[in-house]
Image (cartoon, rainbow, N blue to C red):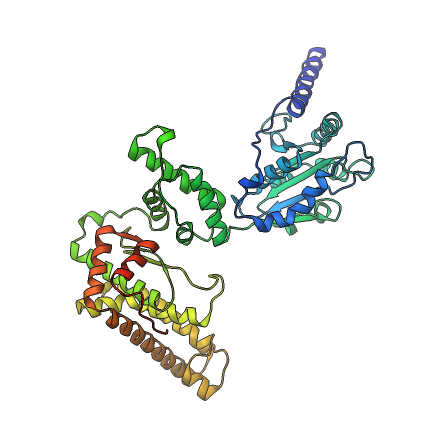
Amino acid sequence: MEKKRTTKSNAACRLAKRQEDFIFKEITRFEPVHRGDVHGADYLLHQINPYIKLVQMFDSSDSCNNFFRGLLFYGPAGTGKTYLARYFATITGAKFIDAREFPINGPEDSWTKSSVQRLWQLLRACVKKTKKPVILFWDQFEEFVLGASDSALSQFYIELDGFAGRPNGIVMIAATTSEPESFSAQLIRPGRLSIHVRFDYPSRLGCVDLLNYFFNQKQPHEDFDAGGFAYLLDRSATPSTVRDIIELAYERARLETQAKSSDIKITKKNIIDVLVDKLIGPPGVMSDEESRESKTIRAIHEIGHALVGRILGWPVALLSIINCGEEGGRTVFIPQADDRILTLEDLYINLASSLGGSIAVEFVKHEKDLGSLFDIRSATNTANSLVCNWSEGDLTKKYLNLASVDYLNGSERLKRFVESDIGNILARARETARGILEVVGVRKILALAGILTEKTVLLQDEFERLIREYNIDNIEMQP
């Protein structure tokens, strides 16, 4: 029995020594992040800058250091919560402690009242010894809240409140993918984690900033149009996604050149290849067996989309005829307005450009385009929205004077009006698209399709250069 007590006591002593060494001797996995390293996150900096200034004012000799206890960073995974916490610690000169690395009894053990108490005891000692504030970073915070015992959570609240109601230089930054409302009201009440900072996916301009930043770190070989590339990223692209794209492009450049790391230079093609793989996917199993004629028809189809959209005011970010199995081609536009805001003009441009592919094939090859079924379905849905949600149907407005129409639950007469209006809007869109393609002419459409067939992918700068060469850029029409 005495031997067991001794063994247990020795284990406790070793754990206490590991915990102390972790706070005072070991360096938490932390690379400094300076202001020049933060990109695409101005909206976050505006929110945290006042609290950075408060921490920078910390004075260990002032017994009235009663600034805030902590912040709750929340939002989708990969949006930079850990990165910004490191920036917070770097810019304030605080010691950065990662709570999840703090030694407790074992890797499978949950937090207990004593382990929470021990962590804050050492943090207070650290502030006293170093005379610097401490940033306690707690990633995946929801796991701690769900896994900790009731007594551990109660102790956590006590420690968060601080001695005599003062945090004494300890600032907690909790990071989570959960919404603040999913936590206990005790946790997020004023005086605890009541400061909430929402992290979101970067905007298009944020992606441009991130692409330029990561690209310029890799010895670029040529000028890089980040604006065009940003529109090829998914709306859920995170800063980590952008960094990974540049890293993959760097690896492609390394494999192509077989050069030393100091001599590797990324080209625009390296980035195009990575982005195309992510946006479209690699070629499908049947791509090698596809005939030249089939590729040409698909190229005419995509050129039709691109020309109609471009002449009506939407710049083209990318055209592709890569057959990845799920789809035979892709045209990506850059709307002139904020792409989160849908305007009536956008709907009409989208409608005409959707039909431009099949009409181009009919106009040039005098045959039906088997790949147009999806386009027709998409155009019909857009026309339906114009009639039912935007009151653009002449018959519906004239006879019924309705601002919004739920024709599925309406009378047979109403359904006929709506269907007639949809047909009329589709007919006008087809007329607009065909009129544009007739002005461009068969010869130019075939020439552009031939270039796309050879290259398989065209980006904005290449497409713009081609329409200038073929004197298409001076054509102006209304949707």
Residue 212 sits in which quadrant? top left
Rendered position, 360 above or below 18: below
Side of 449 where 8 appears, left or right: right
**Residue at image coords 42%, 81%:** 393
Residue farthest top in this picture: 3
Residue 370 sits in which quadrant? bottom left
Estimate the x, y position of residue 9 in percent, counting from the top left: 70, 16
One can see residue 368 in this view: no
Estimate the x, y position of residue 139 in percent, counting from the top left: 60, 38
Residue 81 sits in which quadrant? top right
Side of 124 where 323 appears, left or right: left
Estimate the x, y position of residue 70 in percent, counting from the top left: 69, 42
One can see residue 166 in this view: yes
Estimate the x, y position of residue 104 in percent, counting from the top left: 64, 27
**Looking at this view, is 389 or 257 the one in front?**
257
For the C terminus, the image quarter is bottom left
Rendered position, 456 above or below 98: below
Rendered position, 150 above or below 27: below
Number of marks drawn: 0
**Residue at image coords 22%, 69%:** 441
Rendered position, 14 above or below 310: above
Residue farthest bottom in this picture: 399
**Looking at this view, is 273 or 175 the one in front?**
273
For the N terminus, the image quarter is top right
